[in-house]
Image (cartoon, grey):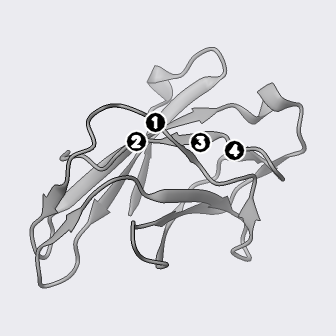
Amino acid sequence: MVYTPHPQDSGAGHSHFTLVFTNVGTDACTLDGYPGLVAIDADGGVLGDHAGQMTTGQDQPVLLAAEGGSADVEVLFTSAGVYGCTVVTAYGLRAYLPGTGDGIFAAAAIPVCERNVSLFSVGPFRTP
């Protein structure tokens, strides 16, 4: 999974980034719906709260070809400063594919609330 920020599109306490998921297996697969997403500290502990889901009306299955096929999701991010919480810097992001408990890690030094606040809204899988 690759984290790509889009600072040029930031404003008014909001920004967004893209997460790209690449199939490294030898078989094609299909991703459908939304990934779970959390910010984590260096020990793997969850920071803040799990991401909510964006309602886009574009929730369609995406077929990933074997060995290199990809899908991405857009993530909206609200600045932690908006909430008046204790702000810490995340070590990275962990995404969970629908129907699995397997987490996929991407390094991302993002300022987040330490506890109980969800700053992320994640969109459905889509073809990049």
Identify the image quadrant of residue 30.
Answer: bottom left
In this figure, which residue is indicated by the disc labeled 3?
120
Is 117 left, or right, of 59 in this rendering? Answer: right
For marks 1 and 3, give the CA distance. 9 Å
Q: Which mark is residue 54?
A: 1
**Residue type of the residue flagged with mark 4:** Ser
Residue at 31%, 61% (x, y): give it: 21
Q: Tell me the quarter of the image containing the C terminus.
A: top left
For marks 1 and 4, give the CA distance. 13 Å
In the rendered image, residue 111, in percent from the top left (x then y), is placed at: 72, 44
Determine the residue located farthest toward the bottom in the rendered image: 26
In the rendered image, residue 115, in percent from the top left (x then y), is placed at: 84, 53
Q: Judge by depth and name the residue closer to the eye, 41 or 96.
A: 96
In this figure, which residue is indicated by the disc labeled 4?
118
Determine the residue located farthest toward the top in the rendered image: 12
In this figure, which residue is indicated by the disc labeled 2?
123
Q: Tell me the quarter of the image containing the N terminus.
A: bottom left
Is 76 left, or right, of 44 in this rendering? Answer: left
Is 1 left, or right, of 43 in this rendering? Answer: left
